[in-house]
Amino acid sequence: MAMVGRKRELQYLEQLYHQSGNQILVVYGRKENQGRELVQEFCQDKKSFYYCAPEVSAKAQKTRMGREIAEHYQVAISEESYDNYFKRIRSGDASKLVLIIEEFQNIVKRDGQFIDSILKLHGKKLYPGPVLILLYSTDIPWVEQELPKVLGTAEKKLSGMRKIEDLVFLTATVQQFPDYNFRQKVEVYGILGGKPEYLSKWDAGQDVKYNVCTHILAKDGCFHHQAERVIRSHLRELSVYHTILEAVASGKRKLNELYKDTGFSRAKISVYLKNLMAFDVVEKVSSFETGGWENAQKGLYQIKDTYINFWFKFVYPHMSDLYRMEPEEFYERYIAGELEDYLTPYFVKVCMEYLELLDSAHKLPFEIHKMGTWVGKRGNIDIIAQNSVRENLICLCNWTEPEMTFEMCQQLFASMEQARVAASFYYLFTAKSFDEKLARMVSRDSRIILVDMNRVI
C-alpha cells in the first residue's frame, strides 16, 4: 500500500536519526494513519531490525523475538532475555542502527523487563554503537494514559512521543487529487477525512458519486462496514457504541438528548463517550469563549472520525435498504439530497486551515493566538481568530448558498451580538460566489476581505 502525505513526519525522523547519541521515540496513532508504512519507509536505506509484537504470552513473545533475531543476524542465542537479545543486534558498521518494535505495548503489558532492557540499550549498556529506538503502537489510550505510569521518571529519557494525526485538507486532497475541483476535494475530505489508508484507495479518476457507490455502498467495496470494523477493533459492547454513534450522527449532540434517544442512563452514556473519545472517534465541542457565554451551547459532542460520521449519518440508519437496493439508487435516495448540508462544517474546517496558512506566512492583519467556533443557542459564528491582546478576526463561511449576501452577514452580526464579541477584521469565505451588491459594499472597507476558495485552493 502506497504511503500518502507524510513528508513532514519523515523529515522529523531523519533529523532525529542524524542527531548524535542514542534516542528513544514513541510513535503512535490509528492504524489507518499508516504509522507502520511511515517507519518502514524511513528505514529503507538504513541498517535496522524490525519486530512486530503480536498479542501472545510473555514467554511466547520472548521466544519469538529471540528466534527472529537469531535468523536475522545468523547467530545462536542461548539465553532468552531482552538484555541478551539487544546485545546481539548490530548495524555492522559505524552507522546508526534503527530498532523498530511495532505494537510494543503487547510486550510491556506482560513483561516489565522489556522497558528496563530498552533503557539499558539507550544507555549503551548492551550495544556500544549508536541506536535509534522506535517504539510504535496503535493503542492510543494506552500510550497516552498508561505508558507514562510505566515509565515513571524514565519518561524524561524519551526523545519524544509523536502522534501520527490525520492529514490536513491540503495534504490529504489537494496533493492527492490534483484533477478534482475545489468542491470535489471538500467532498472527499468530508467523506474520508485525512486517513492516508482511505485516501490511497479512492479512485481519483472517477467522481465522488462513483467512489461512494463503488467503495462504500457496494457489498464488495473496500470501505463497506469499515466504520464498524474500526469500532470492533478497539471496543466491546458494540450495540451500545453503535446506538450512541447513530444518535450523535443524527444530531443528538447533548447528553440529555442522547439519554432520551437511546434509553441508556446518563452515567452509562458518559462512560461510553469517554471511551470513544479516547480512541479519537468522538470529541467534545468547546465553544470559543466570549462575553456572551450564557448564550453559547455547552456540553456538545460530535463524531471526530470523518468516515465514521459519514457512515452513521447516511448509511447505518438504512441498512435494510442498503442490502436490497443498488448502490446508485441508495445514493440518490439517502445521500445526494443531504450531502451539501452535511459538508458545511468540513468547509469551515478547510477555511480555518487556510487562515492558519496565511498566519504562518504572516499575511493576516495580526498573529493568531487562538482560534475556534462559537456555537450559540440562536446562531453560530463559523470562525473567531484572536490575537494575544484579544483583537478578533471573524469569519463567515458559505458552502451551500448560491451566493453570499448581505443578509447572511446580518445574521452573522446578530450572532456576534449574542456572543458579545466585536471584530477588528472580517474574512468572508465562499465556495460559490458573492452577491454583487455585497461585493460593492465591502470593496470600500479594508477591514473586510472576500475570499473565493475556488480560486485560492
Image (tube, rainbow, N blue to C red):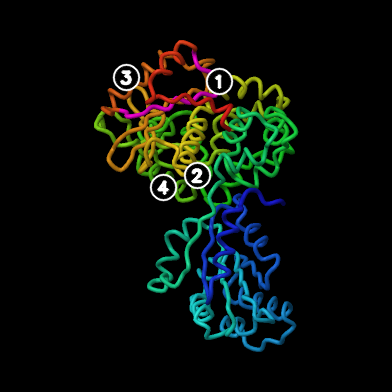
Q: Nearer the viewer, residue 92 or 301?
A: 92
Residue at 57% x, 45% y is: 167
Please identify the dominant SS of the magenta region: strand
The numbered mark, 2 or 3, whose residue comes first in the sequence reads 2
Amino acid at the residue labelled 4: Lys
Above or below: residue 222 compared with residue 81: above
The reply to whether discs 1 and 4 touch (Cβ–Cβ < 8 Å) is no
Callout 1: few (<14), some (14-19), or many (20+) C-alpha neighbours within 10 Å?
A: some
Q: Please give the residue where the numbered disc 3 appears in the rendered image.
A: 414
- Circle nearer the N terminus (3, 4): 4
Residue at 62% x, 88% y: name it.
Answer: 79
Secondary structure of residue under mark 4 = helix
427 vs 390: above or below? above
Is 449 one of the magenta-colored residues? no
How many angstroms separate mark 2 from mark 1 (CA)? 31 Å
319 and 295: which one is in front? 295
Against 320, residue 367 (above or below) is below
Q: Which residues are magenta?
A: 423-435
- Provide residue 336's location: percent of width, then percent of height: 62, 22
Circle 3 crowding by C-alpha within 10 Å: few under 14, some 14–19, many from 20 = some
Residue 454 image offset from top left, x and y in percent: 58, 27
